Amino acid sequence: MKKIKIILTLIITFNCVIQSQESNPKIMHSTESGESFGYKLKNLPSLWIYGKLISYFSNEMVSTFKIETKYIYGERANEIVEIKTLKTNYILQPNILYAFKFTFKRKIVDIWEDVFITEDFSEYKEQFKNSHKNDIVRRYNYNTELCIGCKTDLPIILYNKQNDSISYKIKQMKLVNEEAAQPFSGHYQFAPYNQRIDSAEIKQSVIYFDTTKSTLAPYETKIIKIQVYIPNGTDLSKKYIKRDNYEKKINCQILTANENRLMLWAEIEFKDELGNIHLFPEQGAFVQSLKVSK
């Protein structure tokens, strides 16, 4: 769709859930605040809205936008808001979905200084992608000890922090030596992370997990069932390289990793309420500090 004006300025986003509890939308002016907003619009440097334009008109000094919101600051909303800015020259059509970024001029009370508008929703959702990267979290697991020669159950608890359903899928899982993988260490001392995971993987191990697409309901806590099998005779020890500067090969050390410190590495894909795709968890570190009973 044709862009009307590209949103250029990045701002700090607010990770707050905005959801009307009323059956009928409420009109809210730029100087008001309410429980559904959770903040005062006049105290923020800018206001990001995606929604359907109900009406738009201008006089000699001021333009007024009446919007049926779908998202405010990247969070789902259901409000009718009326926002005033200094006069603009946009040509807009009612009942069309637009992304709005209003910027505030503090010296003029109740009126936003300017507005940037586009019909391209992809710009809006990309702006708030990072604010949704932790919509799913792992709370804790019941077991941190694996056995050799038998299957170990690892029930993991996932929690949906949002008031929207989230679809997710476990793409892959690996058992790795955690020390050799160095999931959160400085990259300048070690090989690239994907190489570290590959060399640290306990390739004889087998992990059983559900690969089908699943859904977490709003605020749902769900136990996902995982089984790990390590055959008898599996060598859990791994060697890895550490340097003062890995790329320049300065002061190379070949180290032996602790064989009793394993990690379940995972790649879980989920879609947030804006349609952004995320991979969870960070660095794939799903379950750390797994011990082995022999």
Image (spheres, rainbow, N blue to C red):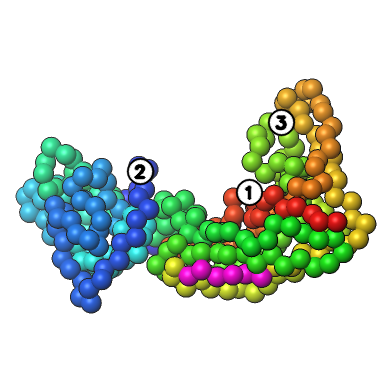
**Amino acid type shown at disc 1:** Gln
**Amino acid type shown at disc 3:** Gln
Q: Which residue is mark 1?
A: 283
Judge the density around disc 3: few (<14), some (14-19), many (≥20) Cα neighbours within 10 Å: some
Residue 40 can be seen, yes or no:
yes
Sequence-first disc among 2 and 3: 2
Q: Which one is in front, 146 or 276?
A: 146
Q: State the residue at coordinates (77%, 31%).
A: 242
Q: State the residue at coordinates (62%, 69%).
A: 224
Tag nearer the camera, 2 or 3: 3
Would residue 166 appear left or right of 64 to someone viewing this image? right
Query: Residue 11: which disc?
Result: 2
* The furthest residue to the bottom: 23
Q: Which residue is mark 3?
A: 189
Q: Which quadrant of the structure image shows residue 264? A: bottom right
* The furthest residue to the top: 251
Q: Which one is in front, 150 or 40?
A: 150
Q: Which one is in front, 167 or 68?
A: 167
Q: State the residue at coordinates (25%, 58%).
A: 37
Judge the density around disc 1: few (<14), some (14-19), many (≥20) Cα neighbours within 10 Å: some
Residue 274 horizontal/vertical position (percent): 43, 62
Magenta region = 220-225
Considering the image in quadrants, where does the N terminus appear? bottom left
